[in-house]
Image (cartoon, grey):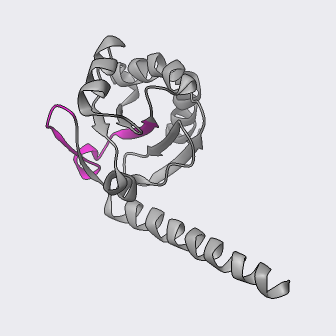
Amino acid sequence: MQTMRKGRFYPMWLAGLLLILAAGWAQAGGFKVTDTSGKTHTLAGYKGKWVLVNYWATWCPPCLEEIPDLIELHGNKKNNLVVIGVAMDYRNAKQVTDFAEGLMVDYPIVLGNSQVVGQIGPVQGLPTTYLYNPEGKMVAQQVGMITREAVESYIASKTARPKK
C-alpha cells in the first residue's frame, strides 16, 4: 500500500513542479499572442501599463457575468490597464467572434490553445485571470469571477504613494 501511494504522489508532484516552472518561464519571458483581428500583443509591448489576461468561455456563466466589468476596465484610460480575453473551449473562431461582438466586447480576444496557456499561465478553472504590473511582472491571479471594483482597488493599493 505504501508503494502505491508513493507511486500516485510522484506524478502529481512532477506535474505540480512543471506547472510552477512553466509559470515562472511565462512570467520571465512574457507572452506573444495574436487576437482574432490578426493583431499581435506582447507583454513587453504594454510596458508601463497594467495588463489583465482573462481566460473565459462562451458557456461559462461567471465568465459572462464579468464581461461588462472587463469592458469598463479596458475602456477607462485613467486606470492605465489593458484587458486581453482568451477564449477557451470553443468550436471555431466564428463562434467566439460572433459571441464577443454580440456582447460588444471591445478588448482584444485571443483564441486559447496550449501554446497560449503555456505563455501566460495554467487554466485552473473558468474564469481564470492573471494581472501583470506595469513592469511586466505577474502580481495577481484569481480563479473565479472578478469585479471592476476589486481590480481597481488592487491597482490603487499598489500604486498609492507612501505619505511623507
- At 45% from the left edge and 21% from the top edge, which residue is drawn? 67
Tell me, yes or no, if residue 108 can be seen here. yes
Picture coordinates of residue 25 (x, y %)? Answer: 40, 67
Tell me, yes or no, if residue 147 can be seen here. no
Residue 47 among those drawn in magenta: yes
Residue 163, picture quadrant = top right
Viewer-proximal residue among 111 and 163? 111
Viewer-proximal residue among 33 and 56? 56
Total count of labels: 0
Picture coordinates of residue 86 (x, y %)? Answer: 37, 38
- At 46% from the left edge and 43% from the top edge, which residue is drawn? 131
Compared with residue 35, is residue 17 higher up or lower down, i.e. above or below? Answer: below
Residue 52 among those drawn in magenta: yes
- At 64% from the left edge and 71% from the top edge, which residue is drawn? 12
The N terminus is located in which quarter? bottom right
Residue 17, picture quadrant = bottom right
Relative to 92, 131 lies left or right: right
Compared with residue 109, is residue 158 higher up or lower down, i.e. above or below? Answer: below
- At 36% from the left edge and 13% from the top edge, which residue is drawn? 103
Q: Residue furthest left?
A: 38
Picture coordinates of residue 98 (x, y %)? Answer: 27, 19
Viewer-proximal residue among 134 and 38? 38
Query: What segment carries the magenta color?
Result: 36-55
Picture coordinates of residue 72 (x, y %)? Answer: 41, 17
Compared with residue 147, is residue 164 higher up or lower down, i.e. above or below? Answer: below
The C terminus is located in which quarter? top right
